[in-house]
Image (cartoon, grey):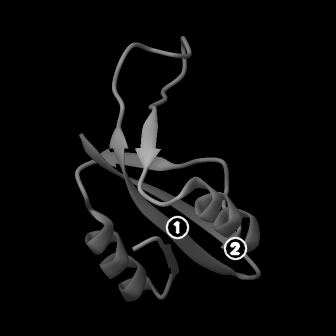
Amino acid sequence: GRVTMANLYRGAGEFQMTVLGGESLGGELRVEGYPHAAVRIDPDIERFIGSCAQKGTSHHWALVHEDVRRELGYICDMMSVAKVTFD
């Protein structure tokens, strides 16, 4: 089903949150012993990788069921955290 992915990163002295949606592919475990998921992300992969390279991310991503991108945007606004989105 639908999922939201978020990454909180501190670069150049300020925090930013990268937020995107996608579709969980489900299926069997692909890597034993580690929490993981296979997700088909909404943005084009080249655009996503380019944004990550240009703006920065960490290697840890939060993943939740449902589309909560709008709610995460509100949190960023309340906390003055820069947003990177793919709408």
Residue under pointer 1: 18
Q: Earlier in the sequence, mark 1 or mark 2?
A: 1
Query: Circles 1 and 2: CB distance less than 8 Å?
Result: yes
Query: In the shown orientation, is residue 7 left or right of residue 4?
Result: right
Q: Residue at x 43, y 84 (%)?
A: 79
In the rendering, which numbered label is found on residue 55? 2
* Residue 81 horizontal/vertical position (percent): 51, 82
Residue 76 circle label: none
**Foreground of the two, 60 or 40:** 40
The answer to whether residue 81 is left or right of residue 74 is right
Snapshot quadrant of residue 42: bottom left
The vertical placement of 24 against 42, above or below, is above
Q: Name above or below for residue 57 compared with residue 30.
A: below
- For label 2, count other residues whose C-alpha is less than 10 Å away and answer few (under 14), some (14-19) or many (20+): some
Say whether residue 15 is left or right of residue 71. right
- Between the C-alphas of marks 1 and 2, the distance is 9 Å
Under circle 1, the secondary element is strand
Screen quadrant of the N terminus? top left
Task: Indicate the position of residue 65 as horizontal and vertical percent values.
Answer: 26, 45
Q: Give the amino acid at mark 1.
A: Thr
Q: Amino acid at mark 2?
A: Lys
- Picture quarter with the C terminus: bottom left
Q: Is residue 25 above or below residue 68?
A: above
